[in-house]
Each structure stands twice: as structure tokens, then as C-alpha cells.
Image: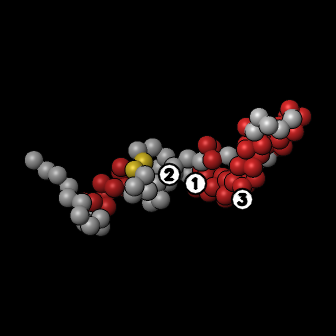
Amino acid sequence: MAKKSMVQRDLKRRRLADKYEEKREKLKATIKDQELPAEDRFAAVLALAELPRNSSKTRIRNRCEVTGRPRGFYRKLKMSRIALRDYGSNGKIPGLVKSSW
């Protein structure tokens, strides 16, 4: 089980990313627009730098919803390899058969 503080930190980052998503998109579009004057684009760069660092999508870490583990994460199932094996062994995931030989 991951530390609860790390899981909460990631949840906070997700909320911030959702909150500032539109604003960041508009500022980035302004920065990329070559038709605008350099002063306006530079002002957009400064405004983007003023936004919270944790509001960037790249700061979000995929974590297992069961254990909070950050590594060995399956995106399709939103859980780690260890939780997947445990749930599969207990028959909690339909269609998953644990192989044995």
C-alpha cells in the first residue's frame, strides 16, 4: 500500500489539471500563434509560468486504484500488476484465467 499522502498529492494534481486545463490550452495556442506580436506571445509565456506547477498534466502519475502503487500499472484496468494477480486469483475479474503449467 502506498503512502496516503502520495495518493492524496496525486489526486490534488488531477483536480488542479482539470481546473486549469482550458486556461493552459488558450495560453499555449497564443504562444504558438506566429501571427501575433512578440510582446503578446511573451506575455502569454509569463502568464503560463504564473499558473501552478501542479496544474500541468505531465505532473500526474498513474496509480493503482486499489493499492496506490505507481509502478507496474495497467492503464486499461487502472490497477497494478500485483493487484491484478491478486484479484485474478480470487476470481474477481471476469474472463481472467490464471495460467499454470
User: Which of the marked residues, 1 or 2, is nearer the chain's N terminus?
Assistant: 1
Q: Secondary structure at mark 1?
A: helix
Q: Residues within 10 Å of mark 3 (few under 14, many from 20)?
A: few
Q: Are marks 3 and 2 in contact (CB under 8 Å)?
A: no
* Mark 3 vs mark 1: in front: 3
Q: CA distance from mark 3 to mark 2?
A: 20 Å
- Judged from the image, the secondary structure of the residue bearing numbered disc 3 is helix
Q: Which mark is residue 19?
A: 3
- In the image, what residue type sits under mark 1? Val
- Tell me what residue is drawn at x 76 percent, y 53 percent: 23
Residue 34 locus on image (x, y percent): 77, 34
Number of callouts: 3
Tell me the CA gap for discs 1 and 2. Answer: 8 Å
Q: Residue at x 86, y 35 (%)?
A: 37
Instruction: Specify whether 70 is left or right of 54.
Output: left
Q: Residues within 10 Å of mark 2 (few under 14, many from 20)?
A: many
Residue that carries the numbered disc 2 in the rendered image: 63
Q: Tell me if residue 52 comes above or below residue 36 in the rendering.
A: below
Is residue 60 found left or right of 33 in the rendered image?
Answer: left
Question: Which callout, 3 or 1, points at the residue further toward the start of the chain?
Answer: 1
Where on the picture, by quarter, is residue 97? bottom left
SS type, badge 2: loop
Which callout, 1 or 2, points to the residue nearer the camera? 2
Name which residue type carries label 3.
Lys
- Residue occupied by mark 1: 7
> CB under 8 Å between callouts 1 and 2?
yes
Q: Nearer the viewer, residue 91 or 29?
A: 29
